[in-house]
Structure formats: structure tokens, C-alpha cells
Image (cartoon, rainbow, N blue to C red):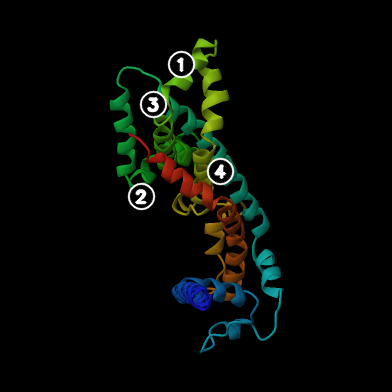
Amino acid sequence: MTSMAMELAAVDSRRRRTRLEARIKKAASYMLLILLAVPFVFPFWWMVSSAFKQPSEIFTFPPTLLPSSFSLQNFIDVFNYQPFAQQYLNSLVIASLVTVGTLLISSLAGYGFARIKFPGKTVFFLMLLSALMLPSEVTIIPNFFFMKSLNLTNTHVPLVILPIFGAQGVIGTFMIRQFFLSLPREIEEAALLDGASRWGLFWHIALPIARPVLGGLSILSFLYSWNLFLEPLVFIDDVNMYTLPLALRNYNDVYGAPLWHLQLAATTLAVVPVLIVYVIGQRQIIDSFASSGVKG
């Protein structure tokens, strides 16, 4: 009995030691991750905290993590300096239209390239992918003259159309095509035998299955349009038509020097939808990239 008790005590001691070592390793891993996150989190924290500071306090050294006194005056001045509310709405509407349009066009094109046989399909798809080799800086001039010939400059139409039928639409088509290539043929064959049309098969079977990649694509499209700068800079002249990237660069004094307290407050407001979209959909982004590389 004594030897058995000693063995049990030894086993219990080893278990406690193992649990303790596991906790120490876990705590060390968390500490390492926190240290690695500091260089990435600190600039964001400094931006948000500086949005509540007085202008003279922003560039104090060493930088302060919290303002000496919280004030919402910077956020009020952001809306008084220029039509920021209208510009914010412009970005929301444009990003939403680009997202919906990209999902619609890319899902149809991706399904067609993946599941429908037609002459020259591979050649057309390679030509489509070749569009990704041309940066937007190369195509912006012909696009500008094309939109000008249609009297669409200084409107939001180019900011909606160009991303949908440009690089973002191509990326979406590629992602959805890769996802649909992984679907078993038996699903389509069974639906066709039951009398489903090609459109019914796409709408009632393919799209519901593709929710993960569609969710990821919607987030990527929204963020792409939300951060777009070059196209609004070229096509938009009226300050009331500005999107947020253009509006953020417009907070300057009469000498052209940046008003940092207003820029930081406006940037903090501009980041809010991005954070919400990413926090909600970060899993869809990971799943969409994982599923888009399954086959093909």
C-alpha cells in the first residue's frame, strides 16, 4: 500500500509539473505575441488618442498614450471644415455599389468559366488574368478620356464601374472560378436530371454553397473601394463629390501645412467601417483564400 501511494503521489506530482510547464509556456507565448504586437498597435493607438488631443500636445516627446484632457472639439471641427458627412456618405454608397456589382458580375463570370463549356474558354480566361499585369496607373489616362467622352467625369460612375470591370472584378472572378472548380460534377448532374435549368442550378445550388468565398470577396471589394485614391483624384473635382481618401488630404491651413489634429480625427472616423468589416468578416477572408486554391 505504501509503494502504491508513493507511485500515485509521483504520478500526481508529474501531472502538476506538466500542467505548470504548460501554463508557463502559454504565458510566455502570450507575452511574446504582445511584444510583437506593440509596433503594430502603437501607431493606431497614437492616432486615436491624438484625435482627442489639443494640437500642441500631439507631437510632444516622449509621446503620451492618453491626452491630458479628452475633447471632442476636433471631431466637431472635422465636419465644420468641409462637407465631411457628405464625403463619408459618398464613400459608403460607392463602396456598397462596388461590392454588390463585383459579387454579381464575378459570380456569373466565375461560374461560367468553371462549369460551362464554350469555345475559347481557356484563352478568354488567360486574357482576363492578363489584365492584372497592367497597374491602374497605366490604364488611368485612357479610362479618363473614355469617361470624359461619355460626360461621366466629376461623377461617381467611374468609381463604381472601373473597379467592377477592372482588377477587383478579375480577382473576384478568379476566386469564384477556383471555388466552383472544386464542386463535384454529380451535384450539377443530379439537379439537371431533376429538371433544373442552368440559371436555377446557379441561383439555388451554386451560390448558396459559395457563401464563404462570396463573403470574403465582398469584404475585399468593400475595403478596396473604401481605400481607393487615384481614381477619385483623377475623376472628381467637386469637393462635395469627394470620397474619404481625398477628403483626408484636404485638411490643410492657408499655407498648405497639414492640420494634424483634424487629419487624425477624420482618419479615426474613416477607419471605423474598415475595422467593423474586418472584425466581422476576417474568418470569411481566410476561408475564401483557402477555398479559392483547392483546385485548378
The residue carrying pointer 3 sits among few (fewer than 14), some (14 to 19) or many (20 or more) residues within 10 Å by Cα, namely many
Above/below status of 257 relative to 114: below
Q: Is residue 259 visible?
A: no
Return the residue at label 1: 189
Relative depth, front residue between 49 and 37: 37
Q: Are marks 3 and 4 in contact (CB under 8 Å)?
A: no
Please report whichever mark, 3 or 4, sits nearer to the chain's N-terminal start.
3
Residue at 32% x, 27% y: name it: 124
Three-letter code for the amino acid on which mark 3 is drawn: Phe
Image x and y of residue 178, in percent = 39, 35
Relative depth, front residue between 161 and 6: 6
Query: What's the mark number on residue 156?
Result: 4
Q: Are marks 1 and 2 in contact (CB under 8 Å)?
A: no
The residue carrying pointer 4 sits among few (fewer than 14), some (14 to 19) or many (20 or more) residues within 10 Å by Cα, namely some
Query: What's the mark number on residue 137?
Result: 2
Cα–Cα gap, marks 3 and 4: 30 Å
Return the residue at label 3: 113
Cα–Cα gap, marks 1 and 2: 45 Å
Three-letter code for the amino acid on which mark 2 is drawn: Glu
